[in-house]
Amino acid sequence: MQQPFLVQHVDRLIAVVSAAVALAGGLTFELLVGVSHRSAIAREPSESWVVRDVQWTRSEWPPEPSMGTHVSYDGTGYVAGQGGAATGVYLVFVQLIRSQRLSSRLLPDTILAWVPALEGKGQLVGQDWTFTCTSFERETGFEGCAPELKEPAAHFQVLGWLRFMKSPTEKGHND
């Protein structure tokens, strides 16, 4: 049975608008990161951000009646401003690259995020988690669980930054 004329056009319109919004959002983010990174370097060549003291912890919780073992891989660390970035208020753009996921069913991925940073420091957090398959889930072929656990691998990377304001101690200085 064919859909009514109006439904066909509304479905197409929603698809086109959704694609346009996604494209505009992605391009805006890339432009913002690129411009903020270039402008920061143009203002002060010694200004940069680095990832520091990242620690990853793997945790497991016993199975529940309806789920297998819950496994979590949690990372914490911080971004540190160097040079001129050691003071002031910044928005630092980072990506979490999960190159090996806990579940054998999940592909590697990258998560884009931003970190507020004050006076040269901002907190990083990242995670991967899954549930192992129960015997019933294995028998029925359920795909929402991990049939096999892998040793995870992940890291953070700074993409760029945007300075919002100078430190109170810098406000008396001229640019």
Image (cartoon, rainbow, N blue to C red):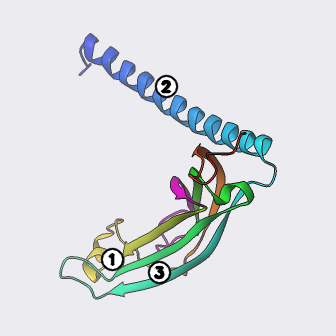
Q: Which mark is residue 138?
A: 1
Chain-order first, disc 1 or disc 2:
2
Q: Residues within 10 Å of mark 3 (few under 14, many from 20)?
A: some
* Rendering coords of residue 27 (x, y %): 59, 33
Name which residue lies at 18% across and 82% down: 65
Please state which amino acid type lies under the numbered disc 1: Arg
Foreground: 172 or 108? 172
Measured along the vertical axis of the image, is residue 38 above or below residue 72? above
What are the residue bounds of the magenta stretch? 100-119
How far apart marks 1 and 2 lie (CA) works out to 40 Å
Q: Which mark is residue 149?
A: 3
Q: Which residue in the protein does label 2 denote?
A: 20
Report whether 138 appears left or right of 105: left
| Residue at the spot 46% in from the left edge and 28% down from the top edge | 21
Do the CB atoms of the residues marked 3 and 1 lie less than 8 Å apart?
A: no
Badge 2 amino acid: Ala
Q: Nearer the viewer, residue 174 or 77?
A: 174
The mark found on residue 121 in the picture is none
**Residue at the extreme left:** 65
**Foreground label between 1 and 2:** 2
Q: Are marks 2 and 3 in contact (CB under 8 Å)?
A: no
Task: Give the mark toward the camera: 3 or 1.
Answer: 3
- Of all residues, the one furthest to the front in this rendering is 172
Q: Quadrant of residue 41?
A: top right
